[in-house]
Image (cartoon, rainbow, N blue to C red):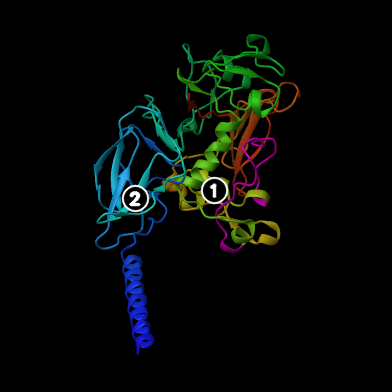
Amino acid sequence: MKTQLIHIILVTVWMAALSSCKKDTKSAVQQPDFISTSLSGSLSVDAGEEFELFVPDNEEGVKYSWSIPDMLDLRSGQGTNRIKVISNIDKGIVPVKSIGVTAERGTQKSYTRWLYQEISILALPPTLDGYRTKRYGAKTWMIDNLNEAGDDGSLGKTHPKYPDFGRYYTWHEAVTGIPNATASDHGYVWGSSGTDDAGKPYVLDGTYANASNIQIQGICPKGWHIPNANDWYDLLVAIKEDFNVPGNSLDQIKQIKEGYIIAWSRQEGLNKSIVAGDWGVIGPYLKGSRPQSEGGLWLGGTTYTQGNWGLLPTFVAQSTDIGFNILPNGYWVSATAAWGDVEGYSWHLAAVLREPNDNRPLRVTIGNTNANFSNNLLGMGHSVCIRCVANY
């Protein structure tokens, strides 16, 4: 009898303990899921622009307590799974692990979930009289070709049929702003070094560390520069991230017939041409206008054959939202007094001396017969169009 009583007591105690554990488990607060933002893939936001931070959790009876750094102000949503914030600084970086959220039920609290990513707060993008501009990632670009003619109107050349293409400049004119300039008018030659127009050191030796970020104002308006290797590469990365351009692999792109991958690093940059076989469908995302068969400016059709990939597009609808507006401006050759590739290819200048080859810079090109964003050395005496980028 005594043994039976002890057994009953032990069972009762065990059941009570089990019940208590179940209650504890039921009332325990789970750590919130990963923090997301309403920002684009590049995680950048203009100063003074409101954005959201949120977690997918929204448990009944749970309060979500957010912590944010001093550079952000909370506008609404504290206590919920979604808050609105705004920056109170003109420019800066929201550090890794400075934004967190904790779930609370009564006196119980979860572990804090942190955002392990930086958020860039960008100074408001500059504007230019007479030009449209647009920000891609952290950089602001002209989305029209440069059209500066100099004090006497003799700087550069215009196409007689297409004045809206802007003006065409040689490398020497571009880096000096002097009509008919020659190599003797400037020092931007292979191996030269100095301080660029943004106050940063450079050496024109073709390396990523010394030359890829040079900011040469030249013919561009004050506070702007001829795009360098990093600028052109960063543009492709920003467009993919900001506009959710598809493409996780080349195999996928072959199947869906759109999108591109970032096939190599920023350090590699423009060291080799960026072509469809390595990246996917690139150039069409940067184009403005449409084929001439649809009332646009470009020669050719809307598709082409890319080897065993089959048909790929030469135009994509998403280019309208992207709005970079590359047109088939071609180039001018002074030696023969002839235009080349007009209506078929775009030619734009890059402030890149890739090799000691007659001090010829790179030009970047988009065509009507492929999906490339190719580059090569600019021909001697060739004049091409220019897009300028705001200094940073």
Could you say where residue 305 lies in the image, as x and y percent from the top left? 65, 58
Mark 1: which secondary structure? helix
Relative depth, front residue between 169 and 35: 35
Pointers 1 and 2 in contact (CB under 8 A)? no
Which residue, as the protein is rendered here, is positioned at the far front? 2
Quarter that holds the N terminus: bottom left
Type of amino acid under label 1: Pro
Mark 2: which secondary structure? strand
Within-10-Å neighbours for mark 1: few <14, some 14–19, many 20+: many
Q: Main secondary structure of the magenta part?
A: loop
Badge 2 is on which residue? 102
Q: Earlier in the sequence, mark 1 or mark 2?
A: 2
In magenta, the rendered stretch is 255-277
Relative depth, front residue between 64 and 358: 64
Q: Nearer the viewer, mark 1 or mark 2?
A: 2
Q: Quadrant of residue 229?
A: top right
Could you say where residue 177 lies in the image, as x and y percent from the top left? 54, 15
Q: Who's the residue at 69% across and 27% down the image?
A: 207
Taking the image as shown, residue 241 lies to the left or right of residue 90, namely right
Within-10-Å neighbours for mark 2: few <14, some 14–19, many 20+: many
